[in-house]
Image (cartoon, rainbow, N blue to C red):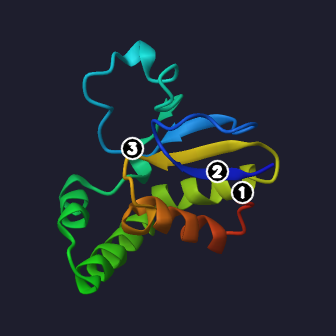
């Protein structure tokens, strides 16, 4: 049993399980009824997405210093009780169920999902 960290909209992996979209907004131009069939996500969970303001900061990050500022602020957002407990639940579930979490960004190294990977790992999650 594992968590897959992936880019939303990509073909599904074998045994990937439920796909959770940790994005602030649904995909544009896609009917809600087609989110799953088009491989976006099965469940939308924006609680683990950066805030709208922080999301823009991440998109605008050009330098390593900019990215580190985004990283620090995102970790602070995920440290609040509701988000922290969600991460704890996902880490625990990863030992009993397959599922995946993802975002739209092409480059994971400059995407909050790379930070989600680290946060889940720190909580003992079993990652693919």
Quadrant of the rendering where the C terminus is positioned: bottom right
Q: In which quarter of the view is residue 42 placed? A: top right
Secondary element type, mark 1: loop
Bin the neighbour count of mark 1 within 10 Å (Cα to Cα): few under 14, some 14-19, many 20 and up. Answer: few
Q: Earlier in the sequence, mark 3 or mark 2?
A: 2
Q: Position of residue 84 (x, y in %)?
A: 52, 62
Q: Which residue is mark 3?
A: 46
Q: In which quarter of the view is residue 71 placed? A: bottom left
Q: Position of residue 79 (x, y in %)?
A: 45, 69
Q: Which residue: 68% across, 51% down?
A: 3
Against 62, is 100 above or below? above
Q: Which residue: 43% across, 16% down?
A: 34
Please name which of the two marks, 3 or 2, marks the residue nearer to the observer.
2
Q: In which quarter of the view is residue 12 placed? A: top right
The reply to whether dot 2 and dot 1 touch (C-beta < 8 Å) is: yes
Please name which of the two marks, 3 or 1, marks the residue nearer to the observer.
1
Tag shown at residue 128: 1
Secondary element type, mark 2: strand
Q: Which residue is mark 2?
A: 4
Bin the neighbour count of mark 3 within 10 Å (Cα to Cα): few under 14, some 14-19, many 20 and up. Answer: some
The reply to whether dot 3 and dot 1 touch (C-beta < 8 Å) is: no
Q: Which residue: 47% across, 55% down?
A: 82
Q: Position of residue 31 (x, y in %)?
A: 34, 15
């Amino acid at each position: 049993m594992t968590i897959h960290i992936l880019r939303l909209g990509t073909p599904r992996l074998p045994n990937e399980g439920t796909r959770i979209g940790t994005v602030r907004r649904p995909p544009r131009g896609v009917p809600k009824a087609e989110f799953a069939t088009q491989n976006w996500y099965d469940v939308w969970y924006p609680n683990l997405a950066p805030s709208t303001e922080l999301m823009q900061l991440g998109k605008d990050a050009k330098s390593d210093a900019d990215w580190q500022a985004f990283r620090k602020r995102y970790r602070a957002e995920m440290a609040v009780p509701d988000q922290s407990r969600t991460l704890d639940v996902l880490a625990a579930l990863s030992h009993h169920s397959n599922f995946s979490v993802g975002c739209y960004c092409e480059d994971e190294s400059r995407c909050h999902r790379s930070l989600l990977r680290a946060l889940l790992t720190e909580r003992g999650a079993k990652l693919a």
